[in-house]
Amino acid sequence: MDNLLRLLLRLLIVPLGGVAGMIAALAIILVGYWQLGDLISGVTEIEAVALADALTTAAFAMMAIVVLMGGIALIGVLFAEAFAVRSWVFHVANGAVSAMIAAQIFPPYPDAPVPFNGMLYILGAGLAGGLVYWAVAGWSAGFWKPLGPAGPAAPLPPAQPAPPTAP
């Protein structure tokens, strides 16, 4: 019964961790590559509305890369769940590799006159997405492996008296 409840809990926690990781990755791209702090400072009210509209539209476009990254990372997540890999290093590396592969498959700006130089931010987004996924769901990966110690240790057998020694 415990295994069934743990499996049901994993079916809830893993997608929640995936969504949280994708939101973290998108936030890194928005704040880092687009330098959102510089865009927001010193704008009028009308410019702020236009900026919010443009950022919403651009976030939907950038979400394509993030969803592709999550789909590629799903391979590593399934591996971690199957073999109960709970290492944060594994999940962070999974996020970084999946982000790099997604950026190669679906480049953010394929027809831009200047080359895309934001691979550092894509890598950072993958690292952040992997870390957030580990914090939500990866630290307890594998529904069949217990989280704590295996249980109380078996009691030791009673001590046998030493055999008498001959004089």
Image (spheres, grey):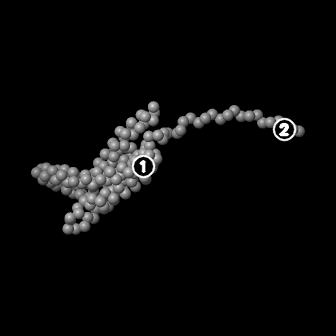
What residue sits 36% from the left and 53% below the top? Answer: 95
Residue 37 appears anywhere in the view: no
When asked about the image quadrant of residue 122, the answer is bottom left
Decide if residue 97 is in sight here: yes
Q: Are discs 1 and 2 less than 8 Å apart at CB?
A: no
Question: In this rendering, is residue 81 above or below 39?
Answer: above
**Label 1 to label 2, Cα distance in Å?**
59 Å
Q: Which mark is residue 79?
A: 1
Q: Report the residue marked by disc 2.
A: 165
SS of the residue at dot 2? loop
Q: Where is 49 relative to 121, above or below?
A: above
- Residue 80 horizontal/vertical position (percent): 43, 48
| Crowd class of label 1 (few under 14; some 14 to 19; many from 20; radius 10 Å) | some
Name the image quarter holding the C terminus. top right
Q: Position of residue 101 (x, y in %)?
A: 33, 59
Mark 1 vs mark 2: in front: 1
Q: Amino acid at mark 1?
A: Phe
In this rendering, position of residue 114 left or right of residue 74: left
Image position, residue 56 (x, y; %): 19, 50
Q: Is residue 60 above or below residue 166?
A: below
Residue closest to the eye, 42 or 73: 73
Q: Amino acid at mark 2?
A: Thr
**131 or 83: which is nearer to us?**
83
Q: Is residue 15 left or right of residue 113?
A: right
- SS at mark 1 in the image: helix
Tell me the residue at 40%/47% (across/down): 78
The residue sitting at 28% across, 51% down in the picture is 67
Q: Residue furthest left?
A: 46
